Amino acid sequence: MWLIRKKLATHAYAIVFFILFGICLYITFYDKTISPTLPVITPLITVHTKTSSGQYLDVHLDLATNSAMCQKHDYLIIYVLSTITNVQRRQVIRSTWGSKQKGVCFVFIVGQVSGTTANAGEYQLKINNEKREHHDVVQIDHFESYANVIYKEIAALKWANHFYPDIPYLFKTDDDLIVDTILVSSIGKLLLTNVSLHDSFLVQNRPNLVSSIISSNRETFFRGGWATDYQPTLRDGKFGVSENVWPHAVLPAYCSGFGWFMSKNIRERLVNASLTYPIEKAAWVGDVFVSGFLAKEANVKCTGLEIDFAQTASANCSCLMVNNPMLTVCSSSFHSGGGGTEIQRYLEYQKAWQVIQLRHNSTNREIYAC
Ligand SMILES: *[C@@H]1O[C@H](CO)[C@@H](O)[C@H](O)[C@H]1NC(C)=O
Ligand SMILES: *[C@@H]1O[C@H](CO)[C@@H](O)[C@H](O)[C@H]1NC(C)=O
Ligand SMILES: *[C@@H]1O[C@H](CO)[C@@H](O)[C@H](O)[C@H]1NC(C)=O
Ligand SMILES: *[C@@H]1O[C@H](CO)[C@@H](O)[C@H](O)[C@H]1NC(C)=O
């Protein structure tokens, strides 16, 4: 707002401003009239500016084109960080661990395809179709990049906070993972009701988890399968955090992006904290930033939850899930770079989903095998 006021203060600025505004309007309008089927190219943030100062982390998310799509009475939003080009992977997830469940809303978070990607326009058309057909995609106005994952994380919270202030719980995960969403939703249900039948899967397999969830504080509920307090700060590479951002040898406590639960209160606190978070103090590693740095700023903490995660290159999540009923999130070969063709990798999602469904069905709990 201060920017606009300052500009209006001087006539010269005001004139320049209105001319530019006019040009923008003209370009937008012109684009639409000559090629109504092509996506309108909006100005995008190409790269985050690590050196700029005085700016806050400002996620660009158009709420008008990313409308509401959950049910008002859902109790859990499972948001899945994805990449615009992973069209087929989202399709496989929708028919496996992202299958519809009562009270649970699945949302994929994607970015913008960069102009240098082959068939960029085609991918935008595809995502538009997905949005129309499935109503489960939120697209931020930042290009796809590893660093911009932090914008996806914040956008998911901001979007949910805006449209569904009353949906009490969220679960975060990624599209290269295989997730027992039946287990995840049963934890959400337990948080909501405190009721767990004595023969339920959770009670049978991890009774301590049930009592710990029932007695937990719902306001501050922010817990993941892998929480860490003492990870060394890396200075280089994909996970590098500069001295300027964080001079300390160990990172703030954070949870792995494989999966975490959060209450709506934590969600709002994180969104609030992002609004005044200086961009030059951001660490461009999604999970470390949101559940660590931003959480610290918001004065909240992500702690551990007794569910099991596995990171493996074996491409064998289905067998791992047979052998460990509490394995909730398992890395697919997309994550770990294990071998296999695309088709084999999708088969892994399907096999694991079979196991997941069978193990939650008390009538044939003992039947399934690896
Ligand atoms: C569940 O238990 C917690 C604390 O043990 C309590 O604060 C909460 O109100 C209970 N919720 C329901 C729905 O009974
Ligand atoms: C977030 O900020 C808004 C606006 O300042 C405030 O009304 C709200 O209470 C804050 N939420 C939390 C959870 O602190
Ligand atoms: C997965 O594990 C099972 C049992 O440990 C084994 O029989 C099977 O060959 C493994 N599959 C792959 C693809 O590694
Ligand atoms: C559980 O398994 C039985 C036997 O295979 C099947 O008939 C039933 O539909 C399954 N229930 C669910 C909820 O999937």
Image: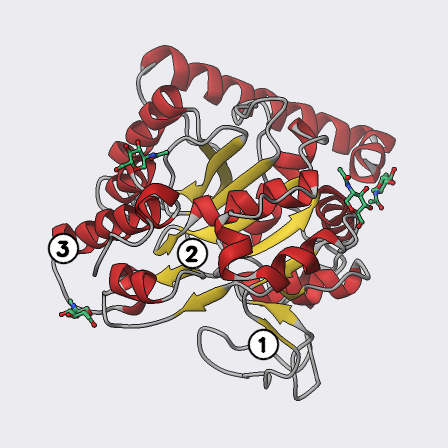
Q: Residues within 10 Å of mark 3 (few under 14, many from 20)?
A: few
Identify the residue position indicated by label 3 in the image: 344
- Report x, y in % for residue 84: 35, 42
Q: Which residue is mark 1?
A: 241
Is residue 93 visible in the rendered image? The answer is yes
Question: Relative to residue 53, is residue 24 drawn left or right?
Answer: left
- The amino acid at mark 2 is Ser
Tell me if label 1 and label 3 are in contact, CB under 8 Å. Answer: no
* Mark nearer the N terminus (1 vs 2): 2
Q: Residue at x 49, y 74 (%)?
A: 239
Q: Quadrant of residue 311?
A: bottom left
What quarter of the picture does the N terminus occupy?
Answer: top right
Q: Is residue 290 visible?
A: no
Quarter of the picture containing the C terminus is: bottom left
Nearer to us of marks 1 and 3 is 3
What residue is shown at x 76% (from left), y 55% (from top)?
215
According to the image, label 2 marks what residue?
145
Mark 1 and ligand 2: say if the CB distance to the nearest ligand atom is below 8 Å: no
